[in-house]
Image (cartoon, rainbow, N blue to C red):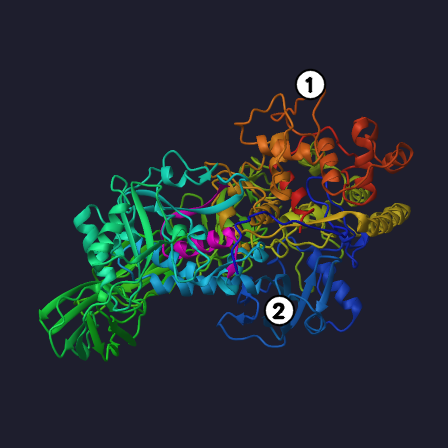
Amino acid sequence: MSKKINKKRSIADTKKGICCTLLATGLILQTCSYPVFADSSSQNTSNTSSILAKITSQSDLQALNDRIGQLEAPTQAEDGNIIINEHSLKLNVGDEFQLRLLDSDGNDVNDVEWFVRERTPQDIVYTAEEYSKLSKVISLDKGLVKAKTRGNAEIWAKKADALYKCTVIVEYDKDSELEKKVDEIADKFRHLSSDADKLMAVHDYLVENIEYSSEHIVSYAYGALIEGKAVCQGYSQSFQKIIDKLNIKGYALKGWSTAAKPEFHQWNRVKLDDGWYFIDVTWDDLPEREYISYKHFLINSETLGKNHKDWYASDEEVDGSKYTYYAYKKQGEFANNKEELEQVLRAQINSTNLPYTTIRVAIPKSMDDGEILNTVKKITGGNPYINEIHRLRDTFGTHKFYSYEISNIPTQAEKNVSLLEVKPTNNVNETTTSVMLTFDQNIDDLTVNDIKMDEVYKTGVNKIDNKTYELRFKDMMFRSTKTLPIEVSKRGFNISNSRQNVDITIVKEETPQAVFKATGDKKGRLENVERGMRYDLGDGVWHDINSSEPVEVTTKYQEPILLIKQSTTAPILNSDVQKILPIETVSPLNIKSVDSVEGKNNGKIIYVNSKMEYKKDGSQNWIACTGKEVTGLSEGKYLVRYKPNGLKLASHPIEVEINVVTEEKNKPNPQPEIQKPGQENKEENKPNKESQDSKTDSKKTPEEEKPNKKEDKKETQKAEQKEEQKPKQKAEEKEIQKPKEKEEKSSSGGGGGGSSSSSKSSSSSGGGGGTSSTSKSVKEQNKISEKDVQKTAETITKLTNQESEQKNQQEKSQLSQQNQEISKEIKLPDIMTMQEAQKTVDKLKDTRQITWSKQAVTKLMQKGIMSGDKKGNFMPKKAVTRAEVAQVITNIIGEKPSSIKVADVSNNKWYAKAVQTVLENKIFSQDKKAKFRPDSNITRAELFVAVAKLKDIKPLDKAKAKEVLSKYKDADSTPAWAIGYVSALVEKGIVSGANNKLNANDTLTREQLSTIFANIIE
């Protein structure tokens, strides 16, 4: 198949609605994912209530789901003497894992019930048996988890009254298959002598194994390495993935060709010891499989600029020169003068006795190419036909490379010679690095060109005598003993038995069997090591091990530790590589603290278990947790984490704070009517709100701030006053759907990346199902007397009409979702795997500021829609400009050539083409002065209109718009030019306000923007 260099992004538009979720932005997007087992009265049930009996009915499942929803932390209902062996799992499709409950001696606990909880499209709990019958993410049988398809699952184990949670993330099978293939290819070349040799080997492998095919424009690296077909992105991504595994620094670049009709293109930038180089594997892959071009291999900026343009590389990346023309030199195709030219061509022409051959040579630009033709005639002694292979010509740099097909070479008198023997020269238990060739008579001088031997790099030929020659080689492309064919041909000689097989023995040092034992969240210790080993932590730097003492190391995120045993003698090769991949551990969720009474040091940390440890901030030593709480603590900040264990690193620590309160403020509280069986009526201190440190990047609304400001005053109010306020507060919370927001921000089960919110977040419910009462402190909950409960129940009955209205709104929303059938679906291919996207997000300098929006940011990174800046920051709290939104939309739909003139956007601005694209597509418009206002912060109204136009949603007429927006208090403040589009989005359920407001004139942050676009693309 001939190759077409046509790199355009494909966007499939189909008529299908998009079901989106109302997130913390309050802007987008609403869905009918209401908890089917929740009711308003459930919030008055203590979250320590129990279900001791076996789950046997639907009502039992409802009660279990309600109870889970009320937990403040996933570990809150655990038994202090029993643990679950894993709180989170990451599996590939097809993997299995056995979950177990273990007692304090590590023995299996029997009579465990297993359940799976789903949050969307409805909040529901299944028995393991029921869930396994469905086509879902996993199947579950007595704790045995089988990964079936990509997605997330939330498993709950129940033993008697105790509950244990495990979140499961299943990666797509294509991702795991691709990663295995990348590892396999990298392992083929890991032992090669230099990084330049490794780059050349990867370059050649891709050229030989990939066919350019525009049909694979969306499969990228998977299509390239698994299916053998790709466009430029596939070549470039595959190359980058492999060299990443080889610890060679580099990255993929995007730009354009310099053709009359420029085309979007992608290639690679790599760093060697003397500087940076470019490699374009796609354009080195010629249609004819017998040729490999090196025209774009290890070239500099000036050379690349001959046929590439509009790429960005940092000014700090200085071009190298040491490895220019490396491939030509290594293959004996490089000449600096006439003498070297003749030597190169003579070796090539005389390497065959046939009347035709192909020659390849690079000569200085100052040398006329006619010199090549004259030298050919001199060597052949006649006038052969010479035809240049023009597609291989390379005249961009300091040398010119030519390739010619030569035919009609004059025949010469042939001397009959027999190849008697080819045998390896190594001793027993040594690696073969040379072979001896013996002839029956003189064959003159042999060169490496006269001897064909694949899968090795031939370094030279030693003449032992007129009949015997030694061929030396290195860098074998195999790591175990193998039989290779050797063939000898030489002009003027008729060689019998010219092709023979020879056994190439590979002897290596034994592969290390080191053991990694984690000691912290990054640190660990390599044990079972010995002198002569080396290790690499994933940065390409090898460190020598000089004794058998354990080695302390600091791991790098998601990078394996590589170990080898160095060769002790030349005939023995370095060992194969041992790979150790430390396992990341998810942080505990919603750990809380209880204040200490002045002078008593009786503060607590609650909701911990025996897999955790804690320490006071500033202390050097961690202390193991032995039960469900840590007691006897003084004032101060404390860190809590999951302990390191073997390959498992400790989790990132979360912080809690214990304050000192007076005896008067710590008086015993009335106990709730409903208690856990056996629970004593004892004094409990109040769990703290989060530390102020966590609030720097998540400012609360005024409505959320008010309860905290009046907390002390509330402590002195009567129980009746507080109980009268509770129903009203619940109704308000339902109206603005806060429980759903809390669940999305706090839950790791639905997060896609295994990440968890800090325990400091006061809005976190620890995975609640929309019925959580965790916005109230433990102290407040425990103040409900029997009389107060009765009063509350009476008050709640007054909310019936409000709840009925809410159900009506839910039904309207369902109908609205059905109407979405007429809007356009936007599908985009992935430019990286989910693992790579998660890794990219985690490497951002300000990744800790990305909290509730992390899943959305990861998705947009995976699609190539948004990214960090040059300094590695995402800036989630930064206000978004019109130019930034234009660029995001352009990343979705692709650039479109335009002649539109924009008065306030010069062509050299980074967003110039994006602005022209959105104007050309009529998604944005200019003002009367032809200005775009690129640096102005975009308003919600402006974004509403852009989203509607992007999805081909038509505006409603004035009368219909007024009717649709009548429920919003601030509808009149919506700009007239936006009302039609905003109302259309509201009608389709795509836009929802907060507190019955649209806030159309407010601005947005980058993380709010990421959430919006993550929900309108597939």
Quarter of the image for residue 582 reads: bottom left
Residue neighbourhood size for the residue with mark 1, other residues' Cα within 10 Å, grouped as few (<14), some (14–19), many (≥20): few
Amino acid at pointer 2 = Lys
- Residue 148: mark: 2
Q: Position of residue 511 (x, y in %)?
A: 30, 70
**Distance between the alpha carbons at the discs numbered 2 and 1:** 57 Å
**Does the magenta portion include 255?**
yes
Q: Secondary structure at mark 1?
A: loop
Q: Say which label, 2 or 1, has the lower sequence index.
A: 2
**Does the magenta portion include 955?**
no
Name the side, left or right, on which 812 lies relative to 189: right
Seen at 73% across and 61% down, the residue is 65
Q: Position of residue 95 (x, y in %)?
A: 54, 70
Seen at 77% across and 63% down, the residue is 62
- Find disc 1 in the rendering and name its residue: 929
Amino acid at pointer 1 = Lys
606 or 194: nearer the viewer: 194
Q: Residue furthest front?
A: 383
212 or 354: nearer the viewer: 354
Q: Which residues, given as a range, are shown in magenta?
A: 229-256
